[in-house]
Amino acid sequence: MSNSNKSVTPLNQTSEMSDGDQLLRIPSRDTLNDKLNQQIIGMLEMDGRLPFKEIATALDVSEGTVRNRVNRMKDAGVLQIKALVDRSAINYATDSMLGIKVAPTSSPSEVAKRLQDCNEIVFIIWVTGRYDLLVEIVSDGDDTLCRFLEEHCFNKSDINNVEVMKGLTTYKNQFLLKSHEKL
C-alpha cells in the first residue's frame, strides 16, 4: 500500500502515519471550528506579539500546547502572523471604491494580480454583478487618487471600465485593527 494516501486529522489529534522520524499532523477542515484554536487566534488578533506563555495562562493550557497549535496552523497555511498598518490612524484623506469591469481579453484574477502590489490598495475582491472587481483605495488626497487612476486604470488594455465611488463618511469598518480596549 502506498504512503500517498495521507489521512487528515484534527490539530489536536495525531496521525498514526509517520514520515521518517516526524509524526504527521495535518489540520482538518474543522481546524478553525476548534474552540481552543479560535481562542488562540482571537488573542493573536489583538496582539500578534503576545507571548505563548501569556496566552497559555489566560486559556489555562500549557505553553507547549499553544506553541504546537500555532505552529501547526502556520505550517498548514491556516494562520499567518503579520504586521498590519491601520490606515485610518494615518489620517488618509480619500477612501474610494473602484468598480472595475475587466476587458473581455483578460480575467479578473490577472487584473487583481497586476494591482495587488499597489500601496494605495487595501482590498480587492472578485464579485458577481455589474463589476468584476471591487477595489478599495486609500490615499493622502485627490492628486494621489488621480495619479493612481491614470497609472493603473485608465487606458489599460485589461480594464474595460472603471467607476470611482469616493467615500464621504464611514459608518462601520470591521476590518480596522482591533484595539485592546473593549468598545
Image (cartoon, rainbow, N blue to C red):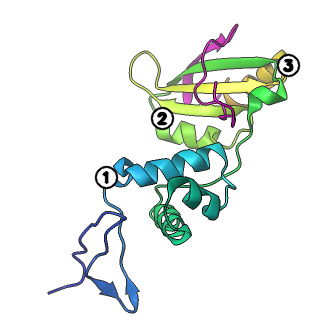
- Are the residues tagged 3 and 1 within 8 Å (C-beta)? no
Residue 5 position within the rendered picture, expressed as x and y whole percent measured from the top left:
21, 75
Camera-side mark, 1 or 2: 1
Secondary element at image label 2: helix
The answer to whether residue 106 is above or below residue 93 is below
Q: Which residue is mark 1?
A: 30
Q: Main secondary structure of the magenta part?
A: loop
Q: Which residue is mark 3?
A: 143
- Magenta part of the chain: 155-183
Q: Which residue is mark 2?
A: 108
User: Which residue is at a point 44% across and 29% down the rendered structure image?
Assistant: 104
Q: Quadrant of residue 15?
A: bottom left
Camera-side mark, 3 or 1: 1
Q: Is residue 18 left or right of residue 109?
A: left
User: Which residue is at a point 61% across and 42% down the rendered structure image?
Assistant: 114
User: Residue extending furthest left?
Assistant: 1
Residue 10 position within the rendered picture, expressed as x and y whole percent measured from the top left:
31, 63
Front in this rendered view, residue 155 or 41: 41
The answer to whether residue 32 is above or below residue 111 is below
Residue 169 forms part of the magenta stretch: yes
Q: Is residue 106 visible?
A: no
Secondary element at image label 1: loop
Among the two numbered marks 3 and 2 on one chain, the one whose residue lies closer to the N terminus:
2
Question: Which amino acid lies under the numbered mark 1 shown in the image of this protein?
Answer: Asp
Question: Which amino acid lies under the numbered mark 2 shown in the image of this protein?
Answer: Pro
Q: Residues within 10 Å of mark 1 (few under 14, many from 20)?
A: few
Residue 48 forms part of the magenta stretch: no
Question: Which amino acid lies under the numbered mark 3 shown in the image of this protein?
Answer: Asp
Label 1, label 2: how far apart the Cα atoms are: 30 Å
Among the two numbered marks 1 and 2 on one chain, the one whose residue lies closer to the N terminus:
1
Residue 44 position within the rendered picture, expressed as x and y whole percent measured from the top left:
60, 50
